[in-house]
Amino acid sequence: AFLGRFLAHLSWGAAARDVLDRCVSIQKDALAEPDVVVASSWGAAVALKLLADRAWTGPTVLLCPGHRRLLSSQDADALVTAFRALPKKTLRRVVLVHGTADATVPIADSRELAADRARLVEVPGGSHGLGAAAADGLISSVVVDVLAKKYGAERVGEVFFAR
């Protein structure tokens, strides 16, 4: 809760945009062809920018994306607009997971991104860390579902869970 209140009072503006651009540059250089990108908070903002820049178009799970917490309103608005303008094929591969009790990043930020374009899984009572959602297997099931859409349910079991 403290971190959320603290971040709400900061205006990082150009510095945050520069950091985001540098993170995206590093990820673009390192990004091979993963099966799925799973990113949380600031990392989810980086993944969001990779999607918006079309540097990554594959399956993506964004956990409590923090784009509005550190970017200026103008930069965050531009990122949301670019994301929402992506082709439906790309947006169908994106799942947002967000706790309803997140005191760091309001769930409204994920609702805005999803808004009938991407899937949103709301975790009742979930905090920013989504610890309970991870512990009870919700996040794993979302990732498996995303992989099943990419490879087919039968193949996911063969490729990822074969012993």
Image (cartoon, rainbow, N blue to C red):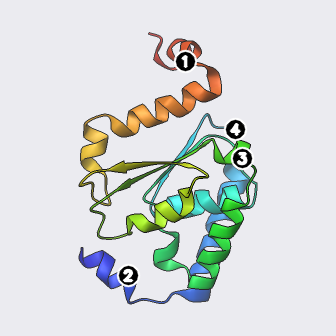
Of residue 70 and residue 92, the one placed in the foreground of this image is 92
The reply to whether discs 2 and 3 touch (Cβ–Cβ < 8 Å) is no
Judging by the rendered image, the residue that carries numbered circle 3 is: 88
Cα distance in 3D space between marks 2 and 4:
33 Å
Judging by the rendered image, the residue that carries numbered circle 1 is: 153
Judging by the rendered image, the residue that carries numbered circle 4 is: 33
Of residue 95 and residue 35, the one placed in the foreground of this image is 95
Cα distance in 3D space between marks 2 and 3:
32 Å
The reply to whether discs 4 and 1 touch (Cβ–Cβ < 8 Å) is no
Q: Residues within 10 Å of mark 1 (few under 14, many from 20)?
A: some
Label 4, secondary structure: give it.
loop
Label 3, secondary structure: give it.
helix
Mark 1 and mark 3 lie on one chain; the one further toward the N terminus is 3
Mark 3 and mark 4 lie on one chain; the one further toward the N terminus is 4
Residue 10 against residue 159 in the figure, above or below: below
Judging by the rendered image, the residue that carries numbered circle 2 is: 7
- In this view, the mark in front (1 or 2): 1
The answer to whether residue 22 is visible is: no
Amino acid type indicated by mark 2? Leu
